[in-house]
Image: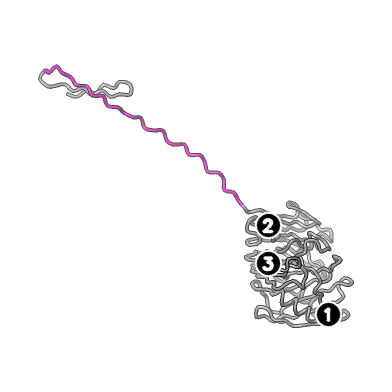
Amino acid sequence: MVRNFPIGGLLLLSLSACGGGSETASVPIITIPAAPAAVVAPAPPPVSNIATLTANLSVRQNGVDYYQFGKYFALNHSWGAEKIGMVYGRDYNVTVTYDKFALPKGTEFVWDYPDAPHDNTMVYGYPSVAFGKTTLGLSGYNIDNSITQIKNIQNWTQHYDVTLKGDLKYMNLMSDVWLFDSTGKIAAEIVVSSYPNDHVNYWSDPKNFFGQQANAHTHEIDMDNVKFDVLVSNEYQGDKKIVFVTPSDDSVRISRGNIDWMRVLNLLREHHDINAEWYVKGVEMGVEVQAGNGSMLVNDFSVSIAYLDPVTRAYAIY
């Protein structure tokens, strides 16, 4: 006969022999309570590298909102809108979303300006990415933080890949380089419009304003299997030069390609349009927005400048 007698945490098993046997053997069996379920701490929320740059929430310098990661910048230029007294959030909106540790790749600009151009002489803004030690909008008109002089540059390449959406007829995708003389004055601006619109085609036409200035002249250049026209105007805001580089075929629109800046500089030096002693800070690429809404997603923007260091006489890459 088997009997169970629970005693506290023990289970007493009693065995009795049949037929009136008097001996009883008791064997204690230990029952171990089940362990309580482990408490798992909740996972911390994921850390996001994504940030947003707007015209009223960012680092601001000289009226320009920007974020910098290494040699690259994301900039919110709405200089045209501000110039005519437009108010952010009321008259226009521009938002820049970027990965703080992957800039400029993945940076997206979204804008909403008035539906119509203010006039044919201006744009509302130039949301852009940039490469260099600084940019014109941040450092002003001087040679501070220049990378080097033109005469020291051995190679300068730019690769770009962007996705444009919205009112495309009001967008001019352009890369912009400013050159400075030894006194810190702007000596020239070089504009390469790979995805031009009627606005920039008007200004770069030799028959129009800049082409009609004294000593204005033209060249041609081939880059990335595309023929470009080059207009050099010697009368830009007084004593500055402006150089427009636009596809010879007005129907060409390039959103992914390469710019050989060394080739452009050599052409201009060959024709004595620029001075080898002038200084370079870097390059900006963005959309001049004449009106409407749209967006630019930067899939890639990579720049490399190889130059001879004038102090060490060694080659360096910036």
Residue at 69%, 67% (x, y): give it: 316
Q: In the rendered image, which quarter is residue 156 located in?
A: bottom right
Q: In the rendered image, which quarter is residue 262 located in?
A: bottom right
4 vs 275, left or right, is left
Residue 46 - label:
none
First along the sequence among labels 2 and 1: 2
Residue 69 - label:
2
Q: Secondary structure at mark 2?
A: strand
Provide the major secondary structure of the magenta segment: loop
Mark 3 lies on residue: 317
Q: In the rendered image, which quarter is residue 208 located in?
A: bottom right
First along the sequence among labels 3 and 2: 2
Nearer-the-camera pick, 39 or 168 = 39
Camera-side mark, 3 or 1: 3
Query: What is the residue that sits farthest to the front in this orientation?
Result: 312
| Magenta stretch contains residue 106 | no
Camera-side mark, 2 or 1: 2
Mark 1 lies on residue: 211
**C-alpha span from label 3 to label 2:** 17 Å
